[in-house]
Image (spheres, grey):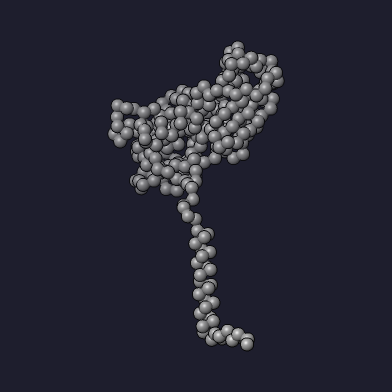
Amino acid sequence: MSPPPPPKLSAPLLLLLLLTLTSTVTSHWHSSSSPSSPPPQSSSQWLPARATYYAASDPRDSVGGACGYGDLVKAGYGMATVGLSESLFERGQICGACFELKCVDDLRWCIPGTSIIVTATNFCAPNYGFSAEGGGHCNPPNKHFVLPIEAFEKIAIWKAGNMPVLYRRIKCRKEGGIRFTIDGSGIFVSVLITNVAGAGDIAAVKIKGSKTGWLPMGRNWGQNWHINSDLTKQPLSFEVTSSDGLTVTSYNVAPKDWKFGQTFEGKQFES
């Protein structure tokens, strides 16, 4: 005896069943494709801080700084520079990094629709004679930027004083290659590294003479790197690793007759 045929579904019931199945599948697909947690914050996210300015009363005020760049105009940074509070400075490793700043929250002083790009070249030291809220602008945990007035006035009127801003870390864009200024005496070799594109700040440096292998250099201060090694009468090569882990190698940047005080140009990171 053959089994009875399956019951026939009416057209309305069949349509209802198909709609239910489609809804179930669609709902399952949306649930599985939605992220279980929010995506990680991007390094380009705008973050809150404050900014003040200084007015250079003497051309010598553009020389020096905690990053060791010396004359900022000759080094190619001009007035598009910034000093960072202790919470941002990272003991000098961040020297050379680039930031974009814009003025916010004060319609009286902000210049709408403007922003500036600056390079970290200096340190704003804490003043523990004041609290972080009561005059110690660069005291931890404050995130504070100190700008030349020429840069400050591109985003706000100078009367603003201690101004709320938003900032974000961005890639540096530089003309030409990385510059290596060699200083020191005898076997003590100090190299100031400037004009770094990409991340802008440097995590590690190696140097190589024609008679040596690759020798790691130590950070002296800011972006001054040093080594004790007799590298005279040898062409010099450099391997520079930025904070984002990328490495650029510049071979035979300095000729074998290089002298202390000279600057040489190597390859460059992509920006």
Above or below 128: residue 271: below
Which residue corresponds to the image point at 51% horizontal and 63% vertical from the top-left?
Answer: 30
Instruction: Give the image quarter of residue 267.
Output: top right
Q: As rendered, which of 162 and 108 lies closer to the eye?
A: 162
Front residue of 230 and 53 = 230
Residue 176 visible in this rendered orientation of the protein? no
Q: State the residue at coordinates (63%, 87%).
A: 1
Decide which of 254, 93 is in the foreground and name it. 93
- Which residue: 48% across, 23% down? 64
Figure quadrant of residue 178: top right
Snapshot quadrant of residue 56: top left
In percent of width and height, residue 34 lies at 50, 58
Give residue 259's position: percent from left, percent from top: 64, 16
Q: Residue furthest front?
A: 1
Q: Quadrant of the C terminus?
A: top right
Residue 243 on image: x %, y % = 54, 34
Q: Is residue 208 left or right of residue 190?
A: right
User: Who's the residue at 36% across and 47% down the image?
Assistant: 105
Counting the numbered discs, the total is 0
Does 18 appear above or below 248?
below
Q: Is residue 1 visible?
A: yes
Q: Is 110 placed left or right of 92 in the picture?
A: left
* Image location (x, y in percent) of residue 205: 59, 27
